[in-house]
Structures are given as C-alpha cells and as structure tokens.
Image: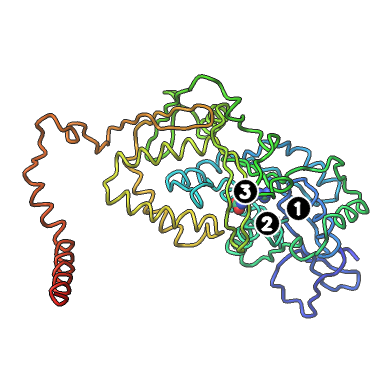
Amino acid sequence: MLCYKNVVKFKNAVWKVRGIIQISNTGEQIMTEKFVLAYSGGLDTSVLIKYLQEKYDAQVITVTVDVGQQEDLTSAGEKARKLGVLKHYHIDAKDEFVTDYIYPAIKANAIYEGKYPISTTLSRPLIAKKMVEIAEKEGATGLAHGCTGRGNDQVRFDITLSSLAPDKKVAAPVREWGMTRDEEIEYAKTKGIHVSTAAKKYSIDASIWGRAIECGLLEDASQEPPVDAYEWTVAPEDAPDEPEYVTIQFEGGVPVAVNGEKMTPLELIETLNKTAGKHGVGRIDHIEDRLVGIKSREVYECPAATVILEAHKDLEKMVMTRHEVLFKQQVDAEWVFLAYAGLWVDPLKEDLDAFINRSQENVTGEVRLKLFKGGLQVVGRSSPMSLYDKNLANYNIKTSFNQSYSHGFIELWGLQTRMYNALKHSAKKQQENKKT
Ligand code: ARG
C-alpha cells in the first residue's frame, strides 16, 4: 500500500477529486483526508492534531495566524511538527487584520451590547479566510477548528469556512468528542503531547484590538476581577497622577496619526494600546449574550479600541447631518450584530459596508482626548468638514440664522402634537360637563 489507512474507496474511478488520490498495491484508488487545522499550540488544538490523524485518518496541516495576540507563536510550529503534521504555516496577518477588519469596525463604531469592541470576533473570519487559502493551495479536503459547542467562535468559523469553501468538510471535533478536561489531559499524555503543569488560571484570547479573559475566578460574576487577570492595562488607582492628552487625526473615517505623528495602521493601534493602557483606560467587565443563548461574564482590556471608537463617534457627530447620525446608529447596530453573530460574509454585511464606507468620506479631522486614572473624555474636536458653526449656536451675536423663522417652524413641527392634545382636552371637558 502506498497510502494511509483507506478512508473512502471508489470502485469506479470517476473522481470528484476531494483529497489525495493514492493507488494501493492492488491497483485500487484510495482517497485520504487532508485537513487544515487552525492551531494555537494549546492543549485543545494539539490534541486535535492527534485526533484528526487517528479518528479521521487524516493528514494534518496546521496554521497559526498572527493577529497581534502577542504570544510566542514560533513554538507552536515546532510543537505541531513534533506531533507529525504534514506541514505547518505561520501567517503574519496583522496588517490585513487592521485594514480589512478593524478599519470597517471603526467606521461602524462597532461595540456589541454597549460595551464590547468585538476584538476576538473580528479575527475569526480572517483566520477562516487564511485557512481556506491554504486548503486550496494544498488540495485539502477538510477544515478543522478547536471551538467548543458553547461559544460564539464555532458559529463564526463554521459559517465562514463553509461559505468560503463549500466543497470542503468543516469539522469541529472538540464539539463532538465528549472528553472532559481531565480525559483530554490523559489522552494528551498517551499521545506524547506536552501538558503544561502550571494550571492556567484563565482562558485568554487576544488580538491587536483587545484581550479577552475568561474562566477561573471570573466566572463568579459578583466578584471584581483579580488584579492578575489584566496585562495590558494598569489599575486606575496605579495610573499616573497627571492626566495625559492625546490627539487622534482621522482621514475618511480611519485614524492616521497620533499627536500629529503619522503612523502605520498597526503602529497607531500599538501606540494607543500602550498609552491608554498606562492610564488604566479600556477595562471592560460585562454580562454578554452569546449567540447560543448563554449569558456570560466577560472581561476585556481594549485600550486602543476604546479610545479610537470614542473619538471616531465624536467626530462623526461633528461632520454628519442629524439624519445621517441617527440613521447610521441603526446601521451600526445591525453591522455589529452581524459581525458578532458570525455573519461576516453575509451579503447584508457587505451592503451595510457600502453604506458605511460612503458615509465616511467627510469623517476627517481631529479629536482630543484626556486620559486619567481609568477615565476617558473627549475634550475637543475640529474638522475642515465641520457642520458645527460656533456663530450659529451663539445667543449674543447677529448671524445668518433668522430667528423669526423659528416661530413658523414650530407651528408646523408641532401641528399634529397640538391636534392630538386638543382632542384629548375637549374629550376631558365633555366628560366633566356630563358629570355636572
Ligand atoms: N465573548 C467574546 C466573543 O464572542 C470573546 C470570547 C473569547 N474568549 C476565548 N477565551 N476564546 O467574541
């Protein structure tokens, strides 16, 4: 036999061509599975390598995608190779992540349930896209991820992967293998997978847009997160005693410079993560509704995201008409829901992107913010496209605003309100007259 264990055999050799065709000694054509696995180097996905090899009879190609999680991803490759993968890919997708995923989120003021800048969410469709690219290149038959059946990420991966690669299998073995954590560790040991002895206190997921901290003590939603949960932000009480001012310049809805200094998109976010983190800005603790219905206590630190989104929203209000501002709030709410809900590749999301992109043409200008002991305030803004005219709002000077028009405006504006109340008033009067 030239092949791996046979998975699928076709008697009459009309190949749909999924996978690798191998010829056995007896001349039979045999197809083996080849899976591209999103790999982090952690326990779950390491066990998954072995699981795919043994239970799916598959060859495994691992891929780690750097979206700015600030972890040592080089050792993941070594680990994967030791576990017998066919190939390992390391992809630095940080720049693409910023321009193609974070930028649209900034333009859409993307905050889920009033608190969460969707820092984990945004990276999923990008990782899925990279997996599919590799799968195409390598002629893989399947795509696998290590998400459990309880979270949102399974939804994002399954929908994006199966939409981008409808001809490939999508597997989520962790969802179906039914192993407890202890059983998993046992399995790992028998397969020679290194299990770190230091029991991890938290489950962390990070991207350049923020760090999500879950599990352990945080599951008691009534308790303040322990100090060691945070790494990117200091406690507000330990922040500097002097406030710091930051000015962010925007062009066409995206940030291009900080304090007058032009930076690459990635540098700009890294800089603001540091500056805001130093002042304890960007800590988030809230109860979040997952797609599968579970309410979960989520803790995040998203310093740059918090600052940039606050500034962007403020600038929009200065340059957009009131009709645009109010309508866009609804579009933004829909956009962030679709992104959170795993529908990044849904056409509605693309339709909304078209609207949002058009709406950003005038979102140019700068916003000044004050950072102090965990607090963040916009304290100034200016724009060449501003619709704010300080003379119009002023009560003391004569301007082109003709106050005599206001009377007529109010007559018409309140017409129906007055009609309704007049009816109510006369009905009440009639009632009173009947009584007397
Ligand atoms: N709840 C967040 C989301 O759905 C992030 C959770 C990620 N945390 C994790 N450990 N995977 O986007």
Q: Secondary structure at mark 1?
A: strand
Q: CA distance from mark 2 to mark 3?
A: 33 Å
Q: Residues within 10 Å of mark 1 (few under 14, many from 20)?
A: many
Front tag of 1 and 3: 3
Judged left or right of residue 26, residue 134 is left
Extreme residue toward the front, this view: 436
| Circles 1 and 3: CB atoms closer than 8 Å | no
Q: Nearer the viewer, residue 367 or 297?
A: 297
Q: CA distance from mark 1 to mark 3?
A: 32 Å
- Give the number of the disc on residue 61: 1
Residue appearing at x 64%, y 67% in the figure: 167
Amino acid under disc 3: Glu
- Give the number of the disc on residue 135: 2
Q: Residues within 10 Å of mark 2 (few under 14, many from 20)?
A: many
Which of marks 3 and 2 precedes in the sequence? 2
Residue appearing at x 68%, y 60% in the figure: 150
Q: Nearer the viewer, residue 397 or 418?
A: 418
Q: Which residue is mark 3?
A: 298
Judged left or right of residue 65, residue 187 is right
Residue 50 position, x and y percent, is: 84, 56
Amino acid under disc 2: Ala
Q: Secondary structure at mark 3?
A: strand
- Give the number of the disc on residue 378: none
Q: Secondary structure at mark 2?
A: helix
